[in-house]
Amino acid sequence: MRFFSATVSLSLIAGSMASGCASDAPESEPTAAIDEDYGKPLYGVDDSAASKADSFDGAAGPKEAGLSSTSEVWKATKRWYQTDAAAGLAWPAGSTLTWDEKYSAWITSLEKIDGKDGHDTYRLTTPWGKSLESPRLECAEMAMFLRVTFASWYGLPFYMTAYNASMGGSMYFGHFGIVNSAGTRISGFPKFGTDYKDYTASLATKTNAQIVAAWPKDANLRTKSLASNRDDDNSAVLGAGAYTGAYFDEIFLNKRTAHFLTRMLTYFGSIHLASTQNTFNIRPETIRAGDTLLERWQRSGIGHTIVVARVDHLAEGKLSIETFFGSMPRIQGYWYDTNLSKGYFTSELTGGEGSNYEGDKYASLGGGLKRWRTPVSKSGKWYNIVPQADRTAFVDGADLAAIGKRPGQFQELMGTLAPNEAREVMLQRIDVARSALRLKPASCSNRERREAAFDDLYELSAEEFGMSETEVDETYRTLEDYVLAELEYAQSKTCCWNSTNSDMYLVVMQLNEERVSDSQCIEPLVFKNDNGYKVFADYAASMGLGSRWVAWSEDEPCAQRAVARDIETDHAWAPFCSVRDEVLGNEE
């Protein structure tokens, strides 16, 4: 399940730290060691017993007395538990919703559209009326991006906690900047309040149309990307050569927030979303838009983050839940309807009752349904608390029995599909993975995703339709499944190659269509490393697509970079030549 990892380089922090108004020379920005599992310079979480203890008040954050306006990203003028009568993006004037409820309403209001990446995604609209399709982000990045964006737009407090012993322990990334427990800026990180501009106040008297027409640009910000492989970070909605920094420049009048986000999305991942210092577990029946669902199959490595997009309460207490998520390579938020989403909510990986290969209970790994803690200031410190209004929904992270029951509870709450409906969902999952592979044919994550759906289809077909696995393959397999066979991630360098493209897919498939068209069956040539990729590159040149064939590159940290030949997984499918005629017939 490597498609959930995060690949980020330090390209976003290269060059000058300031964009115009800082007079002192920039300091050297600190970084973190590259996490081999995440593939990014990731800070850790505090594993001490005190920090892991789950409570309403949570652990103490930074001291207010040490905070400085020079480090501040935005001013927190409101609190999440308060109400505000002014109209907003997803609520009318006179609304009695708290800001926490308004966040949920905003997520619900995101328009579902057909995105430029070729799948359903969402449209983001700013308070000034600018609309853009979803950015391309990885899964944990997507959840953090949305929360920070809303908090910044409306002057709400926000922070997340990380840990790095060499930097003094706990680190806090929030509206106050990047600080330590004393509230002091961690040396080397920007003085956001003076290094970057906030144009919000200067444009406050303008109409939205006037603001959009005179939208200020930050040239330095627009060069920033979150990936060394810039194709992975290309913001498709803004055209060629525009990256995440350019996207942020288009949605924030406060450029400090944009620069802050580039740091936060670099150093934080799903392990921080799983931490009880930043989020808390909730009961399934209390789910609402804006919550997050985490898959965690290991204690400290990568996971998968899913954002709850919409929740509808149906008859007899049933729920319809739609979601979206980012992935790797970065994609626009991928929108799943309730039937596709159900597989995540009912999976044991989301804090279920089973155990992983190391014997750890999934319920103990931080997975499952989460809600954001909300910052309050008290006794001279910031605290990330469980809001009063949510305390009846709270599930203590130490209550593994209650945590472990939640996937089963979602199984009941989200209903049971008829066998033919369940089959359609599985076929849709297969099609989703195939569509992604047509854009990025080296993606091992989508090869895994396709085969996981086939595994479920094999089981359902045997139980409900009396079909053998071979009959399933004859009915539903296509040539591309065999060509883009699933690979062992740790033993296959193809899995690190995120820069493959749709033209390369066409080359690989046309070569194989010619290869298998002979009257005497020949097995397809799997697209993988076999002492390199020369046979495919040569064929691309013969097609006049040599310039579109991208040489292999280490687009994410790749411990298996030196392997001579990739290793395929043990396939459940029938050998190609035994089902050749049926499979090729499915291509028509």
Image (cartoon, rainbow, N blue to C red):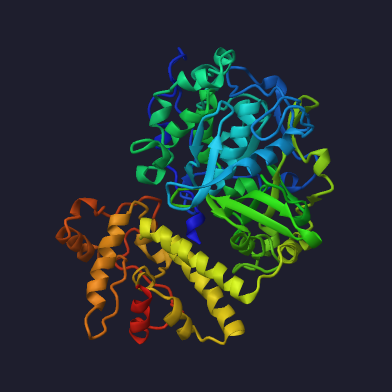
The relative height of residue 410 versus residue 389 in the rendered view (above or below) is below
Quadrant of res 100: top right
Can you give x and y, in whole percent of width and height, for residue 34 in the image? 46, 46
Quadrant of res 180: top right
The relative height of residue 567 versus residue 164 in the rendered view (above or below) is below
Q: Residue 518: tell me if it is visible.
A: yes
Can you give x and y, in whole percent of width and height, for residue 10 in the image? 42, 38
Q: Residue 197: tell me if it is visible.
A: no
Quarter that holds the C terminus: bottom left
Can you give x and y, in whole percent of width and height, for residue 382 in the image? 73, 30
Q: 541 or 496, which is in the foreground?
A: 541
Q: Residue at x 79, y 52 (%)?
A: 396
Q: 365 or 49, which is in the foreground?
A: 365
154 left or right of 504 in image:
right
Quadrant of res 208: top right
Q: Residue at x 58, y 24 (%)?
A: 73
Q: Residue at x 21, y 81 (%)?
A: 518
